[in-house]
Amino acid sequence: MAEPTRSPAPAGATWTLDPDFVVGLIGMGDMGKMYAHRLSAAGWRIIACDREDKYDDLVKEFSGNSNVQILRNGHLVSRASSYIIYSVEAASIGRVVAQYGPSTRLGAIVGGQTSCKDPEIKAFEEYLPADVDIVSCHSLHGPNVDTRNQPLVLIKHRASDSAFAKVENLFRCLNSKHVYLTAQEHDRITADTQAVTHAAFLSMGKAWHATNSFPWEGARYVGGIENVKINLMLRIYAQKWHVYAGLAILNPEAHKQIGQFAKSTTELYTLMLEGHGEELRERVYKAKAAVFGKEGEAKWGGEPLLREEVLDQFTLGEKKGGPPALPNNHLSLLAMVDCWSALGIVPYDHMICSTPLFRLWLGVAEHLFRTPGLLDESLRVGIEDRTFSRDDLQFTIAACGWAECVSLRQFDTWRERFAVTQRFFEPRFREAVEVGNAMIKAVLASSKD
């Protein structure tokens, strides 16, 4: 795979405002609205739509923004826009493009903001007129994250140099880091960096839900690593289910990653239950060498990505005195690194495309594997201590459940599994999102770029 490249002037770059260049947004979910707000604030003219039953609410929401005009449907947006961005669920992209694609303005540029490019590009090739340029994009972060210095993938699939330059110019007002990939490269990297990361947090939520426990209550899950687990698990379940389902189920590259994560989790947990300490240690240290380098090496410079003292600030529970947190085998982190090793993935190779969530998760994995004594303590707990066995069993079951949903392409089952756990944790979402945003801001500010 070609090495991804960064824009020569990503953050703070200047752009030229073209009053005749109209941006059309089809789909006004969280990311569509984020684009509308950020681009219009920079002076670009935006026309947008969603389902017609949302028209009145959107008109009211954007009534104070003179640079945003809400239209009733995608036909009207397609006919009047210079650059049309489809910001819809990946599972719906084919149907929506089939409906509105034929109305695309002559000579326009079309792109998509979905997290999975395989169905998006197929839809564009099938339903768009041949005279339309295709330049897709993907902001690799959530709608509430500051776009500055975050990766923005640009895909020049079928476009002239001048059309691509217009899209680059438009997006420079976001002050993101431009990364140039093909659609296939995008799906491979997002699978490597997001699919398994999401599966780990989704499985944590299912495990805690199955044991009817809120992990921030009590002394079992305390400290920097646990803060990341809890806050980002809640952050994921506070989002819409289709964001993660589409990336996992529709991305062909994600299937083997999620399947291997379930396999790694099951096999490592089995070694712990059966007391095979030497075999467990040999396997985990082999994975450590593959992902982080052998002793004395560091595949991502000499400085750690995260400092645990920064993470210690972000807890949902009250900080209490008394005994320290219970030792944990960190099965989720061991399985993540084992999965990367089994698939030959070196996550540092994708740092230019890393999401804040992935950077946090890689950072705590690095902390566990590279802090002297911490990994050995984790392995000892896995063999000798059964304190977390119930949670680990449910985590293993959950990981296998998500993998089965993906392999069978079961959107309905995914949605139901997600929704029932979402309802369980819902009372803490508002606080968790606020804490999660603060955590991401603090960690990214203190970590190496």
Image (cartoon, helix red, strand yellow):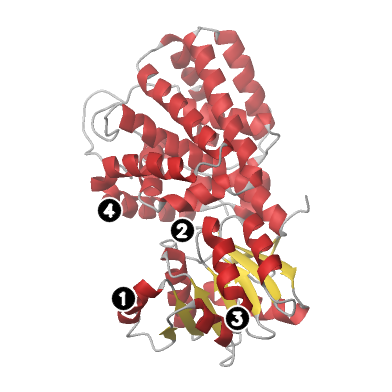
Mark 1 lies on residue:
57
First along the sequence among labels 4 and 3: 3
First along the sequence among labels 1 and 2: 1
State how far apart marks 1 and 2 are (Cα): 22 Å
Question: Callout 1 environment at 10 Å: few (<14), some (14 to 19), or many (20+)?
Answer: few
Front position among marks 3 and 2: 3
Residue 64: x, y in percent? Answer: 32, 85
Check if mark 4's residue and mark 3's residue have beta carbons within 8 Å.
no
Mark 3 lies on residue:
103
Indicate the amino acid at tag 4.
Arg
Check if mark 1's residue and mark 2's residue have beta carbons within 8 Å.
no
> Helix or strand or loop: what does disc 4 sit on?
helix
State how far apart marks 4 and 3 are (Cα): 40 Å
Q: Residue at x 40, y 38 (%)?
A: 229
Check if mark 1's residue and mark 4's residue have beta carbons within 8 Å.
no
First along the sequence among labels 1 and 4: 1
State how far apart marks 4 and 2 are (Cα): 15 Å
Relative to residue 335, is residue 439 depicted above or below? Answer: below
Indicate the amino acid at tag 3.
Ser
State how far apart marks 3 and 2 are (Cα): 30 Å
In the image, farthest residue toward the bottom: 19
Relative to residue 420, is residue 186 depicted above or below? Answer: below
Mark 2 lies on residue:
142
Mark 4 lies on residue:
430
Residue 313: x, y in percent? Answer: 33, 44
